[in-house]
Image (tube, rainbow, N blue to C red):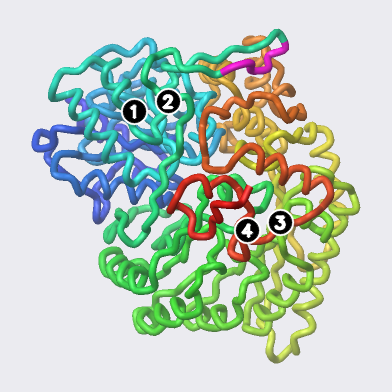
Amino acid sequence: MNENERFEKILEKVQKAPRYTGGEMNTAVKEWDDCPLHFGFCFPDTYEVGMSHLGLKILYGLINREEWSLCERFFMPWTDMIALMKEENLPLLSTESRHPMHEFDVIGFTLQYEMSYTNILAMLDMGGIPLEGKDRGESDPIVVAGGPCAFNPEPLADFIDAFMIGDGEDVMTELNRVILERKQKGLSRKECLRKLANLEGVYVPSFYDVEYDASGIITGIHPNTPGVPETIRKRVVTDLNQTYYPEEIPVPYTEVVFDRIMLEIMRGCTRGCRFCQAGMLYRPVRERSLEKLIDLSEKLVASTGYEEISLSSLSSGDYTCLPELIRELMRRMKDKRVSISLPSLRIDSVLKESLEETQQVKKTSLTFAPEAGTQRMRDVINKGVTESDLLEKVRDAFEGGWSSVKLYFMDGLPTETDEDLDGIADLARKVVEEYFRVPRERRAKGLRVTVSASTFVPKPFTPFQWAAQDTIPEIIRKQDHLKKVLNIKGVNFNWHEPYVSFLEACVSRGDRRIGRVLLTAYRLGCILDGWTETFRFDTWMEAFKACGLDPAFYANRERGRDEILPWDHIDSGITKQFLWHEKEKSEQAVTTKDCRKGCNGCGLQRWKGVCGYANPRSV
């Protein structure tokens, strides 16, 4: 019985076989021998999470449109499949052609969440690839990674050969051409990596050394190889209308987390929320034109049969032509019974007309993100919205026939007090009151207000990158307080597991030494750490102890202004000076204006022609 037949046999024994079968509509099935370059796109979480990710769909289509390159997918198997694969001595196989991972020329991971890092090690292990870059030979694939978490590449520096920093559409093709050249010209692994290191936006960690003092604080990050840059500048796609976007996407046979068309209407955000890493990393704002979005939506509906289009961005309500876009989409999609959803809505956006348009086909739950319960706290984080903004938009929604509203908050923010937590309950109570202010005959039945509070995790390249996270006992105390004050009729309260948030803080701001913890935790059995049923906090603490590292050093320690941070050699476009100034303003609850109202001098003004709002004279 060959490998494929043994794989088919174990599919009969797993819980969710469609995770592994492949063959979905719109998948790219290319002849292996017809393509000189083979790229394995790895999503380090389960199929239903990975197939909800827009970046996978963009890069999958981008690579496969080139005649010379083939892209196939790998996902993290669930525990039942892992056990059966071990029993049958089967390697991790690609979804499309079921080739083993080690047969690909390049293996690429998308880094979306720090708690998926042990899954990367598991997938490499199951794929027959040495876990550490130093152990890979000339016949092993080049292992690369990109995505938002790649902006602090250091925790994975031992395992990833090259990181792509920033937007991936252009650099992906350039990277693949270099690896194809390696294959065709017989370049050594080191020669290939040297060429990759000279691509803008590519970081090869083995070409850099990190020094520490006796307390564990970094004293220097320096190149150890001639010709590589001192700092690595992120890649920016400046024109979304001209860059690649798929007109066909794979359609899963099984239910996934976001089972709909994700239409990226814009990239970046001008608001400057101080906790938000994505808002800093994806600057500047770039919008797709109305005409381009209409054309893409019609092609995607025709090619997939989906009945919902989600207008995707960090802040969809800020899209310049949002009312016109929704009006035109509804005109074209109404008869097809395709609904339009608006995630990531800011509560101060002009939404009333847009909401009325979207309800014509199907009402979906509306999500708003006040983030904090008091105005002082919203000013600390530079949210730039008021209580009246929220209540006005909620009133519009209830009068428009909605009865289900989700409110997102954070607990554990810098300078937070119990009064700020009480403000969350006060705001939820006022939202309920707005519902009952709508006359009975006009309001929809079944009020449901869902309040979610995630624990604040300090992230690189934000004004809070220097902040200490609350300790676990303090997080638990605050969550218990919220449970008590949010015992309100019509309100449901959800919260995040504090132990997961603590580890996320350790890894997100980790240095190279965290790689030893990751490897130790993996060897002790930690995988699928983002899932409650498989998360093993005690084992993680055992791994830290075995490596002689204190997790509180990473999560619960305030950094000094002059401390060298593990990601200081990465240039995100935003200067450290600007971020520190924003931190100081947060401590005084002073806000910073939206970039659209004038340049704040974040650093992008250094890059000519990149940001449409940048003023070169700003400092």
Q: Quadrant of residue 393?
A: bottom right
The residue nearer to you, when weighing 361 against 242, is: 242
Disc with the residue nearer the chain's start (4 vs 1): 1
Q: What label sits on residue 271 in the rendered view? A: 4
Disc with the residue nearer the chain's start (2 vs 3): 2
User: In front of the other: label 3 or label 4?
Assistant: 3
Element type where label 1 sits in the image: loop
User: In front of the other: label 4 or label 2?
Assistant: 2
285 sits left or right of 272 in the view? left
The percent coordinates of residue 391 (x first, y second) are 75, 74
3 in magenta: no
219 in magenta: yes
* Whole-number angstrom distance, CA of label 4 to CA of label 2: 31 Å
**Residue segment shown in magenta:** 215-220
For disc 1, the marked residue is 198
The residue nearer to you, when weighing 217 against 526, is: 217
* Whole-number angstrom distance, CA of label 1 to CA of label 3: 36 Å
The residue sitting at the bottom extreme is 441
> Quarter of the image containing the N terminus?
top left
Mark 4 touches mark 1? (CB < 8 Å): no
In the rendered image, is residue 453 in sight? yes
Disc with the residue nearer the chain's start (3 vs 4): 4
Mark 1 touches mark 3? (CB < 8 Å): no
The percent coordinates of residue 127 (x first, y second) are 33, 24
Q: Quadrant of residue 459?
A: top right
For disc 3, the marked residue is 592
For disc 2, the marked residue is 229
Name the residue type under label 4. Answer: Arg
Query: Going 20% across and 39% down the picture, which residue do you hit?
Result: 70
The percent coordinates of residue 144 (x first, y second) are 37, 29
Element type where label 2 sits in the image: loop
User: In front of the other: label 4 or label 1?
Assistant: 1
